[in-house]
Amino acid sequence: MSFPFAWNEFADQPHNVAPKSERLRYHFRHAGSYVDLAWSNIVRAAPIIANLARYRAGMYKRPVILSNAFGLAVSPTADGDADPLDFLAETGVRETLLRIPSWEKDRLGDYERFARRVRDRGFGLVLALLQRRDDVFDLAGWTEFLDEVFDRFGPLASHFEIGHAWNRTKWGLWSFREYLDLARPAFDLAPKIGVKLIGPAVIDFEFHLYPPTLSRLPFDKVSSLLYVDRTGPPESRQFGWSAAGKAALLKAVVDASSRAGRDGWVTEVNWPLKGTGPYSPAAGRPNVSEDEQASYLVRYYIPLLAGGLVERIYWWQLAAPGYGLVDTRGGAWRRRPAFAAFRTLVRELDESEFIGRAGRGPARIFYFKKGGEYTAVAWSAGKTCEFEFAVPARRALNRDGAEASGSGGRRFRLEGSPLYVVFSERPVP
């Protein structure tokens, strides 16, 4: 059964209009799909466990190049007089993601013009194709949408993400089998047009959905909307799993679900903000302050990328009142602390090489090499503490890129806001 589609323009997501009673009846009618889902995971349990042990043991033990690892989603917003591409360029990011909803087929010309502007400014581009419930019942119309998007944007985008957060019923799909039905036409069309596909775009910590989808769909890249506890930092544990632990488990599941291992991208993550009312995508407790959001952004990117199990991460998104790096309310765009934090992260670490990790207790120290300099990104994941480096620092920057005290010294006070401590000589063995 289909229901009227209702879009929440404040939070950039659908309203959940399907009644719980109807969803429950659907799940009972399609109980066979859950047997398939369970069996798909059971038969891969042993290799998943073996992979997980190997990946967790190997995290942070080998060098990792952070090349094109930082991504940022952008929208052709009409809020105010600002040009989002000017703000995008200011961050220094090189990889972007643009959403295109299936229900806005009549606006593909507008999206194409914006995508061309993105490419003309020198940014890489990935397109995320969004679905709704009507697409499940009109596969021909969905296929026509894919065909036209691939044809128009094939020369502009490096990859196309098929579907979005489909494990949430408000996005229109009620089972993994419905997702398979939506995704398969993309694989029929892609070779004819020569485009690359990513998916399955599962949101949150629901990794049991990867085996039955990846065993049937040969995506070029595997994508996850990998959120963590949005009331706290990335080190927080959900069912015992931190963000870095989740990345290791995701890689273990992905590699056990397909014959050839595939690189993983996080195509959406953010922390919703307190005090933004209807603009927050998570009403109530799962909201943080702007300062916390900025620190959590850095503390999410670094452990996941340095672990070598996630190739690229996209923050959702550049400009949005409830969670973006920029607040668009009131006409004039305001750069939030997270904007400066993201800009500093990209400037200091893009094209760097992760070379080691240190720290005891709450201290988190990640070392990188770039050019002739070495940088330690350091913070405390708990109480304020101190850490003494093996060599004196040449300079130090705070999370937002401003000069911090500590030049010429070895001992630094660590708090939740990350520091960039720069050395002229190698600070680790």
Image (tube, helix red, strand yellow):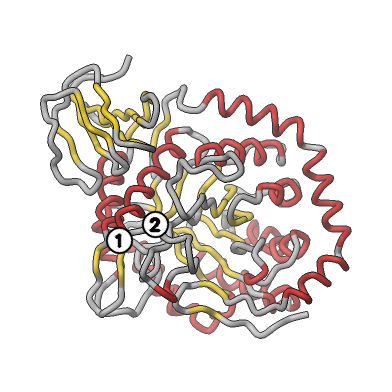
Q: Indicate the secondary structure of the residue bearing disc 2.
A: strand
Instruction: Determine the residue positioned at 45% across, 49% down.
Output: 313
| Residue at mark 1 to residue at mark 2: CA–CA distance | 8 Å
Query: Which residue in the protein does label 2 denote?
Result: 72
Residue extending furthest toward the front: 383
Q: Indicate the secondary structure of the residue bearing disc 1.
A: helix
Q: Is residue 152 visible?
A: yes
Instruction: Determine the residue positioned at 49% across, 69% down.
Output: 283
The answer to which of 243 and 267 lies nearer the viewer is 243
Q: Earlier in the sequence, mark 1 or mark 2?
A: 2
Query: Which residue in the protein does label 1 denote?
Result: 88
- Mark 2 is surrounded, within 10 Å at the Cα level, by few (under 14), some (14 to 19) or many (20 or more) other residues, namely many
Q: Is residue 298 above or below residue 27?
A: above
Label pair 1/2, CB-CB below 8 angstroms: yes
Residue 67 quadrant = top left
Q: Is residue 356 visible?
A: no
Instruction: Specify whether 98 is left or right of 364.
Output: right
Instruction: Specify whether 367 is left or right of 104.
Output: left
- Mark 1 is surrounded, within 10 Å at the Cα level, by few (under 14), some (14 to 19) or many (20 or more) other residues, namely many
Instruction: Determine the residue positioned at 26% across, 28% down.
Output: 386
Q: Is residue 313 above or below residue 427?
A: below
Residue 148 quadrant = bottom right
